[in-house]
Image (cartoon, rainbow, N blue to C red):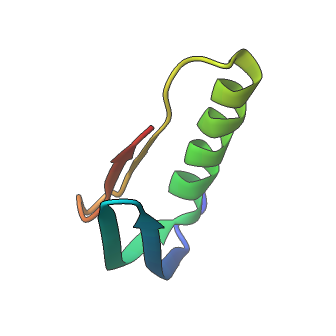
Amino acid sequence: MNFRVHEISRRSEIPGFNVNFPADLRTNELTSFYDELVHMYGKMSGSASLVGLESNVDIRV
């Protein structure tokens, strides 16, 4: 398991919704989220979650 921490500042613009936050995420958290997104896209159903260890990020698609 890779515990390298990535500092991310992300700004997203969705009609009616804006978010801008710093986040510390580990490589394995990002990899897991990516894998879930790929699986969800391939099946055209399901869900994907990105939950940071320190509870500073909780994204569910």
Lateral position of residue 50 relative to residue 53, left or right:
right
Residue 52: percent from left, percent from top? 35, 57
Front position in the image: 33 or 16? 16
Front position in the image: 18 or 51? 18
Quarter occupied by the C terminus = top left
Q: Residue furthest right?
A: 42
Q: 20 above or below 30?
A: below
Residue at (23% x, 58% y) in the render: 55
Lateral position of residue 13 relative to residue 36, left or right:
left
Residue 42: percent from left, percent from top? 76, 23
Q: Residue furthest left?
A: 55
Residue 48: percent from left, percent from top? 50, 35
Q: 27 above or below 24?
A: above
Front position in the image: 19 or 30? 19
Quarter occupied by the N terminus = bottom right
Asked which quadrant contains residue 2, the reply is: bottom right
Residue at (63% x, 26% y) in the render: 40
